Amino acid sequence: MSLLIDTDPGCDDALALLLALESDLDVAGLTTVAGNAPIEDTTRNTLALLEFLDRDRPVARGAERPLVKRQDTAEFIHGENGLKGELPDPTCEPIDISGAEFIVEKAREDGNLTIAAIGPLTNLALALGIEPDLPEFLDEVLVMGGAVYAPGNRTPAAEANLHADPDAASRVLQSLDPTFVGLGVTARATIDPATLDLPGRRGETVESWLTYYPEDVRERYGLEHSPIHDAAVIAHLTDGILTTEERALEVDTGEGPCRGALVADEYGVTDEPENGRVATDIDVERFREALGRAIESAV
Ligand code: BDR
Ligand code: CA
């Protein structure tokens, strides 16, 4: 299985990339998307992270704005420029095709590609515009997104990745049979840095990602530690930590208070067919073991 990661680093994205690149997963490439910060920053952060981890992978710069609505970033959570920890400027450049084109190219080449989408879904929606037969070339699409079993974190109803581009999320849902790994499980994907051996400057950098939530935000959510949402998707690929169930799903693309919300027909009260999956449970201990092991080997 080859894996492509679509990402908007982001401190939890950074830890997701660390986990993926320290594991046996065959990471074929990365695409960047505007989300936690503007596209210049998320692309720079992705390249800088690869150098921090001493890995060489193609990175394609993706969409700079959502399909329809205005862009909304989250530096107040992830730090100025989208990533705490001050990595040096990268020496390498993105490849010269767009994120959406790279997704299509890799999918056609591989024929059975897995995609982990851990930012807004704009690139995937654009890729479907280029290649409507994209689903034929994909094995699995895992999305960090949605708040079916928890309140939203961007609005009372919506999780940040889906709220950032609901129109793209809806397009992806119509065609790609995705699995949504939402806040109901990822809010539990925390790890206490005090349980890890984090020596030197590299340890400090990783610790700044693990503790990225400002105190007031963490307290608002009633959490002892920062949730490492995006790494839960990767830990599922490495260690099968999630329980998932089929549901009839919809993304609200309206302009009301539920814009960007993922709606799941839990009890089958509609006659709509199941068109995707949601994560319903997480093995938190296995998540901590997998991420802790990867971190200690990376620092
Ligand atoms: C998601 O939004 C981003 O802020 C995080 O990186 C994660 O992908 C959590 O809602
Ligand atoms: Ca992210």
Image (cartoon, rainbow, N blue to C red):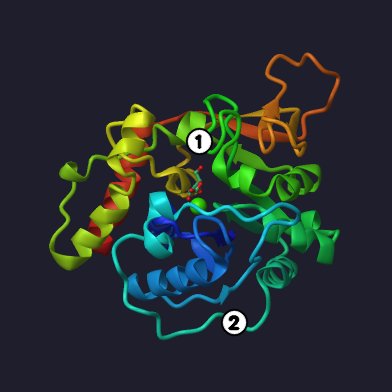
Whether residue 131 appears in this view of the structure is: no
Residue 295 in percent (x, y) is at 28, 55
Residue 186 in percent (x, y) is at 45, 36
| Front residue of this view, candidates 215 and 232 | 215
Residue beneath disc 2 = 95
Quadrant of the image occupied by residue 244:
top right
Kindly identify the amino acid type of the residue bearing the numbered disc 1.
Asn
Quadrant of the image occupied by residue 55:
bottom left
Q: Name the disc covering residue 212, or none.
A: none
Residue at (54, 38) in percent of width and height: 154
Residue beneath disc 1 = 153
- Quarter holding the N terminus is bottom right
Whether residue 7 appears in this view of the structure is: yes
Kindly identify the amino acid type of the residue bearing the numbered disc 2.
Ile
Residue at (68, 52) in percent of width and height: 139
Residue at (64, 84) in percent of width and height: 96
**Pointer 2 local density, CA inside 10 Å: few below 14, some 14–19, many at least 20:** some
Residue 34 in percent (x, y) is at 58, 61
> On the picture, is 211 further left or further right than 71?
left
Above or below, comparing residue 175 to residue 126 in the picture: above
